[in-house]
């Protein structure tokens, strides 16, 4: 069977699908001029195309190009990575006889919206679902978190719950730092960057020998003040790091601080678990799918006291019961193995196979 895809996952997914019998063609950006560049790698065909937007379906010329290719394929898969507000703009309709699977990365609804853009997204979400229903834009949906999957199923859509995977060979366990280290990744309001000062204040009021490493941040004024003035020795700010370096950082850290307000399917959470590093997260869709069944606890959303106490709980366990902490680290790793990209690829294979069978 032949698959045409854009942004399906890492190379490991394509390779696994090829092993399962799929003839995979992948559209990627990178061409410097209109037209295409085609090459093969590991039996997978890559077509470089020129487009400006991250979403293939938001580019009229590229949609026409895909329509011209579609008759050669049994199924087409697209994911959309635009910011949430742009996710609500209707994409161009693919005119193709091949079934089209659409994956939405962002959450359908923002729980407890606190900004105008969040409320606007929640306003548009029912309209978007109605558009999907009435126009029959797609034959099936891949949904990354279970809460959204339930909504799709209740509304009668053909939907498959398949979360993000993790490269367990890259994100693996390592010796932890000598100083208890908490890692945070993000720079936006939705990632909880504005909550960091209060969390850190509360933690340092109880323990001063904890180190925070904050990756890819610095936009919020209170965040900058925290880094530059109050705790210069205990808080380290790093720019966005290459994936291999970030994997090493996660594996050497003792805890991932994840105070997000909302998520779709946060790969940082499963990457942390795969690295043997527990996660302190609020109980929200996205992290919940990865953390249920792991040794990590889910906290009441936006309860900063609970988040601070959770950091101190892990710190105390690491300091007083190192063997117990190592067991938790090992259990995190074992739990993450079920989300290895090869396992996720097997689920994707089943989804695609079912869609093709139902449309022949």
Image (tube, helix red, strand yellow):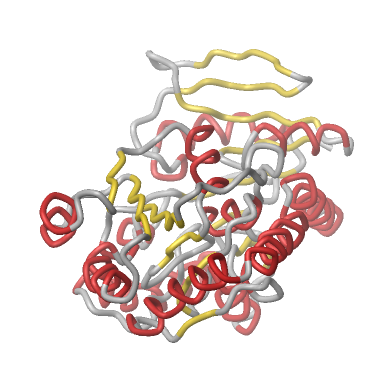
In the image, what residue occupies the spot 52% across and 29% down? 65
Query: For this rendering, which residue is in front, 241 or 101?
Result: 241
Residue 275, how many percent across, how many down?
62, 50
Quarter of the rendering occupied by the N terminus: top right
Is 266 placed left or right of 99 in the picture?
left
Residue 180, how many percent across, how many down?
46, 57
Count of numbered marks: 0
In the image, what residue occupies the spot 55% across and 74% down? 148
Q: Is residue 258 above or below residue 98?
A: below
Residue 360, how many percent across, how many down?
85, 52
Is 282 placed left or right of 317 in the picture?
left
Query: For this rendering, which residue is in front, 313 or 348?
Result: 313
- Residue 162 appears in the figure: no
Q: Is residue 76 above or below residue 319?
A: above
In the image, what residue occupies the spot 74% across and 52% down? 344
Is 49 placed left or right of 339 in the picture?
left
- Extreme residue toward the front, this view: 320
Quadrant of the rendered structure where residue 23 is? top right
In the image, what residue occupies the spot 23% across and 73% down? 198
Quadrant of the rendered structure where residue 277 is? bottom right
Query: For this rendering, which residue is in front, 270 or 147?
Result: 270
- Residue 5 appears in the figure: yes
Residue 279, how many percent across, how many down?
53, 65
């Amino acid at each position: 069977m032949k698959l045409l895809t854009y942004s399906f996952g890492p190379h490991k997914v394509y390779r696994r699908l090829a092993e399962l019998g799929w003839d995979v063609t992948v559209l990627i950006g990178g061409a410097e001029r209109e037209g295409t560049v085609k090459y093969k790698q590991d039996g997978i065909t890559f077509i470089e195309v020129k487009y400006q937007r991250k979403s293939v379906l938001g580019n009229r010329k590229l949609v026409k190009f895909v329509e011209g290719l579609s008759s050669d394929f049994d199924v087409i898969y697209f994911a959309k990575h635009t910011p949430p507000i742009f996710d609500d703009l209707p994409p161009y309709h693919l005119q193709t006889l091949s079934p089209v699977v659409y994956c939405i990365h962002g959450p359908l609804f923002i729980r407890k919206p606190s900004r105008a853009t969040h409320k606007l997204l929640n306003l548009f979400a029912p309209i978007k679902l109605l558009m999907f229903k009435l126009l029959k834009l797609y034959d099936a949906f891949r949904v990354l978190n279970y809460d959204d999957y339930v909504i799709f199923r209740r509304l009668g859509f053909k939907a498959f719950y398949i979360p993000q995977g993790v490269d367990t060979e890259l994100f693996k366990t390592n010796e932890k730092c000598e100083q208890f280290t908490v890692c945070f990744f993000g720079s936006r309001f939705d990632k909880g960057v504005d909550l960091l000062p209060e969390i850190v204040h509360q933690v340092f009021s109880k323990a001063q020998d904890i180190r925070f490493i904050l990756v890819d941040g610095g936009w919020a004024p209170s965040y900058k003040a925290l880094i530059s003035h109050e705790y210069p020795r205990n808080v380290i700010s790093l720019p966005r790091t290459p994936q291999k370096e970030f994997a090493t950082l996660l594996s050497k850290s003792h805890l991932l601080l994840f105070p997000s307000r909302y998520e779709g399917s946060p790969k940082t959470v499963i990457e942390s678990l795969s690295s043997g590093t527990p996660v302190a997260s609020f109980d929200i869709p996205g992290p919940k799918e990865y953390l249920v069944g792991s040794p990590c606890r889910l906290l009441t959303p936006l309860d900063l006291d609970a988040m601070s106490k959770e950091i101190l709980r892990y710190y105390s366990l690491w300091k007083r019961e190192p063997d117990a902490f190592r067991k938790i680290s090992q259990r995190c790793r074992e739990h993450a193995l079920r989300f290895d990209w090869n396992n996720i690829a097997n689920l994707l294979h089943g989804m695609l196979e079912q869609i093709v069978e139902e449309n022949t």
